[in-house]
Image (cartoon, rainbow, N blue to C red):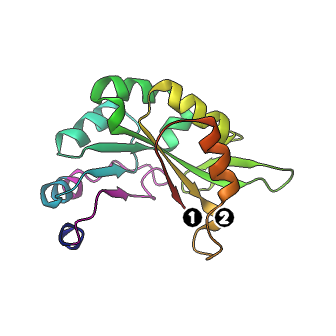
Amino acid sequence: VKIFNEKEVDELIVVDIDSSAENREPDYVMIRNLATECRMPLCYGGGVKSMDQVERIISLGVEKVAISSAAVSNPGIISKAAELVGSQSIVVVMDVKKKRRGHGHEIWTHNARKPTGRSPIDFAKQVEALGAGEIVINSVDRDGVMTGYDLELVSEVREAIRLPMTVLG
C-alpha cells in the first residue's frame, strides 16, 4: 500500500479470493491495517455475505465493499447494502467463464469452482437494478494466458448496463 501511495494510484481493490471458498470471515485486522495506511479509495472483497460484515468493513475506513458469491446466492444483499452504505460503496464481482457447450458465458462462484447457470448479462442487469454502484468482470478463462481481454463479453455487458466497470483476466 505504501508503494501505491507513492505512485499516486487512483484506487486499490484487495480481494481475498479464498475467503468464500473456505467459508472464512474477512480478516478485519488486515483490513484495518490496509485502510489506515491507504491514501486512496480502498475496496475490500472476500467472504462478504452479511450486512454486519459490510457495515464493519466500512467502519474500518474502507470506501467500497466487493460482493461476489453472496450477490449470486442472495441478490437482496446488494439492495440492503446499498441502502446501508450507499450505492457508490457497493461493487459486485462476477467471475465469468465461457460455456463449455454452446455459446455464451456463465457466472461461477467460490473461486470459479461452482457453476451457477447464471448469464453475466442478465445478472449485470439485475445487479444494476438492485443498486450496485460498480461491477467487476473477471474473465477466468483469460486470466494469466496473455491473450487479452474477452472484449466480446465486455461489450455485451457494457451494452446491457450503465454502471462503471472494471475488467480483469
- Report the predominant secondary structure element of the magenta stretch: loop
Magenta segment = 7-31
Look at mark 2 in the image and give the residue it sits on: 141
- Element type where label 1 sits in the image: loop
Question: Where is residue 71 shown, x and y percent of the image?
Answer: 50, 36
Reading the chain from its start, which is encountered first: label 1 or label 2? 2
Look at mark 1 in the image and give the residue it sits on: 169
Task: Tell me: residue 165, above or below residue 76.
Answer: below
The image quarter containing residue 49 is top left
Question: Where is residue 59 shown, x and y percent of the image?
Answer: 18, 39
Question: Where is residue 31 shown, x and y percent of the image?
Answer: 23, 54
Going 29% across and 32% down the picture, which residue do you hit? 52
Going 34% across and 43% down the picture, which residue do you hit? 65
The image quarter containing residue 122 is top right
Q: Residues within 10 Å of mark 2 (few under 14, many from 20)?
A: some
Task: Tell me: residue 39, above or below residue 67.
Answer: below
In the image shown, does 49 or 66 lie closer to the viewer?
A: 66
Task: Tell me: residue 156, above or below residue 19.
Answer: above
Mark-to-mark CA distance, 1 and 2: 7 Å
User: Can residue 38 be seen here?
Assistant: yes
Q: Are marks 1 and 2 in contact (CB under 8 Å)?
A: yes
The numbered dot on residue 134 is none
Residue at the bottom extreme, as displayed: 146
Is 19 inside the magenta-drawn segment? yes
- Element type where label 2 sits in the image: helix
Indicate the amino acid at tag 1. Answer: Gly
Residue at the right extreme, as displayed: 102
**Quadrant where the image shows the N terminus:** bottom left
